[in-house]
Amino acid sequence: MPGAFVQCQGCSGTWLHVILRPVGGSGDEAWSAYLERSRDLAEQILRVDDPYDLGLQFMGRMLDLTDIGEYAVSMYCLWGALTDRVELKPDEEDRALAEMARAAREWLAVDHGDSDAIRRYFDYWLYDVCGYERPEAQSADASDD
């Protein structure tokens, strides 16, 4: 099965962040609920000056949906990292808040019917922005032991 694993800060266990079933479709109530919640929160984040509290809500609401698919886990990890940055690196707060707005704006621009586009969004945000270790690097490190 294709996929990439990500270790979430504050999470126990490793989660597959690539969904392994078709996304979208009129009969997929779980996917629809996920999209509705994530779009609503992303839109709210773009309307406020300080998106930190909404970022925490974003993370919490995705936690409620982790049983529906791996994308919710990725979104939880993404917003966990962005809000952690505000808490743990106060000197970077302005940049972290700007990144929250950018993450929300880019999420709204993603074609949610395109699994590859969603995968690219999470790959970029989790690995390139938030600094999670890419799976290839994890495998290489394990073989060095």
Image: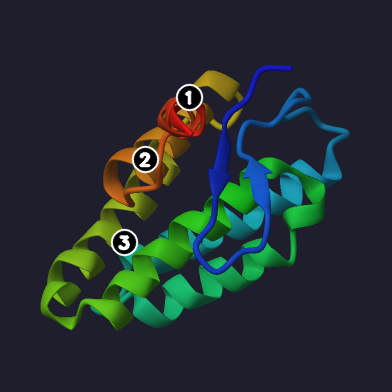
Say left or right for 72 vs 87.
Answer: right
Identify the secondary structure beneath mark 3.
helix
**Mark 2 vs 1, N-terminal side:** 1
Count of numbered circles on the image: 3
Q: Which label number is shown at residue 100?
A: 3
Say left or right for 97 vs 114.
Answer: left
The spot of residue 33 in percent (x, y) is 74, 53
Q: Nearest to the eye among marks 2 and 3: give it.
A: 2
Image quarter of residue 28: top right
Q: Please tell me which residue lies in front, 35 or 87.
A: 87
Q: Residue furthest front?
A: 145
Image quarter of residue 91: bottom left
Determine crowd level at label 3: few under 14, some 14-19, many 20+ residues with C-alpha closer than 10 A. many
Three-letter residue code for mark 1: Ala
**Mark 3 vs 1, N-terminal side:** 3
Is residue 16 placed above or below 33 in the rendered structure? above
Q: Please tell me which residue lies in front, 82 or 36.
A: 82
Is residue 72 placed above or below 59 in the rendered structure? above
Measure the C-alpha gap from mark 3 to mark 1.
19 Å
Three-letter residue code for mark 3: Met
Identify the secondary structure beneath mark 2.
helix
Question: Looking at the image, which residue is at 74% across and 55% down?
Answer: 66
Disc 2 marks which residue? Answer: 127
Question: Looking at the image, which residue is at 61% across and 38% down?
Answer: 17
Question: Looking at the image, which residue is at 29% across and 70% down?
Answer: 85
Three-letter residue code for mark 2: Tyr
Say left or right for 49 vs 116.
Answer: left
Measure the C-alpha gap from mark 2 to mark 1.
15 Å
**Mark 2 vs 3, N-terminal side:** 3
Q: Which label number is shown at residue 117?
A: 1
Question: Looking at the image, which residue is at 63% across and 59% down?
Answer: 37
Can residue 114 be seen from the camera position used here?
no
